[in-house]
Image (tube, helix red, strand yellow):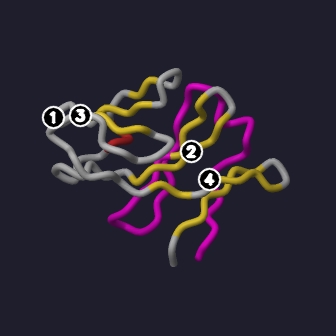
Amino acid sequence: MAELEVCPLDELAPGEMKVVRVSPTAAIGVYNLAGELCALEDRCSHDDGSLCEGEFDPEEGVVVCPRHGATFDIRTGDALTLPAFLPVATYPVSVVDGIVRVVVPG
């Protein structure tokens, strides 16, 4: 497992999202849902579109794929609406010494 630094906590206010690159072709979106930090794979399970480019509702904890409108639960990664039906990966998030970190397989 690898732990990646995302940003200082004060740079990820409630209702905001930051993208962290895992590799040249993979990324994770780290979302602040009213103080609850969640990390979600930046890849729609329907067609590999970037979820981080879609809109998200911080109150409902839902992100919308900008390509075809599939919605995902940011907390669990579950696909909530078609055309997606498979979940996407979620990752543990922590704050250490004021820095937001996400744990990824590695």
CA–CA distance between discs 1 and 4? Answer: 28 Å
Q: Does the magenta stretch include residue 12?
A: yes
Q: Is mark 4 on a helix, strand or loop?
A: strand
Q: Disc 3 residue type?
A: Thr
Binning the other alpha carbons within 10 Å of mark 2 as few (below 14), some (14 to 19) or many (20 upward) gives many
Q: Which callout, 4 or 3, points to the residue nearer the camera? A: 3
Q: Mark 3 points at which residue?
A: 81
Residues at marks 1 and 2 touching, judged by CB atoms closer than 8 Å: no
Q: Disc 1 residue type?
A: His
Q: Does the magenta stretch include residue 58?
A: no
Q: Mark 2 points at which residue?
A: 38
Q: Disc 2 residue type?
A: Cys
**102 left or right of 23?**
right
Q: Is mark 3 on a helix, strand or loop?
A: loop
Q: Disc 4 residue type?
A: Val
Residue 9 in picture, x, y percent from top left: 73, 41
Q: Is mark 1 on a helix, strand or loop?
A: loop
Q: Which callout, 1 or 4, points to the residue nearer the camera? A: 1
CA–CA distance between discs 4 and 3? Answer: 29 Å
Q: Which callout, 1 or 3, points to the residue nearer the camera? A: 3
Q: At x 74% / y 35%, what residue is drawn?
A: 10
Chain-order first, disc 4 or disc 3 = 4
